[in-house]
Image (cartoon, rainbow, N blue to C red):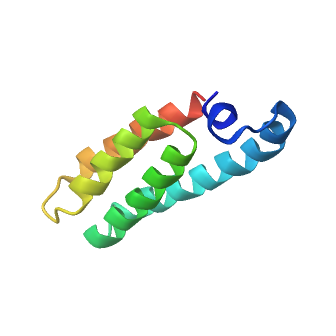
Amino acid sequence: MYLTATFHFSDEQLSQMLPGFFDTLRGHLAAVEQSIAGDSEELSRAAHTLKGALLNLGLEPEAALALELEERGMDSAADRGDLSALARRLRMMLAAL
């Protein structure tokens, strides 16, 4: 596991920390979802925060999707339906973890 290899956490430490990490991820994702209907800058910032949290956990495919939301979110003309679909896809990926 990425966290064990990178940070040398024990299994016990991981079992204590992971629920908090996943709660944080869900909160960041909720911020992304809420900002889709609003300001492009807010969406980009929320997606950037989520991307960083995902990378901290070694979740690169999920972080790539957050990066796509971040970049596309900067475009005020971006299709909000497409952005919502990306956020739903990311939610499904996280639910599978």
> Can you give x and y, in whole percent of width and height, for residue 44 in the image?
32, 63
Quarter in which the N terminus is drawn? top right
> Can you give x and y, in whole percent of width and height, for residue 14 in the image?
78, 38
Q: Using the rendered image of the protein, determine whether residue 97 is visible from the camera's viewpoint.
A: yes
Q: Is residue 38 left or right of residue 49?
A: left
Residue in front for this viewpoint, 88 or 75? 75
Q: Using the rendered image of the protein, determine whether residue 39 is visible from the camera's viewpoint.
A: no
When asked about the image quadrant of residue 7, the answer is: top right
Quarter in which the C terminus is drawn? top right
> Can you give x and y, in whole percent of width and height, for residue 63 in the image?
42, 42
At x 31% / y 56%, what residue is drawn?
Answer: 70
> Can you give x and y, in whole percent of width and height, for residue 47 in the image?
39, 57
Q: Is residue 8 left or right of residue 30?
A: right
At x 63% / y 55%, what residue is drawn?
Answer: 24
> Total label count?
0
At x 50% / y 36%, what residue is drawn?
Answer: 59
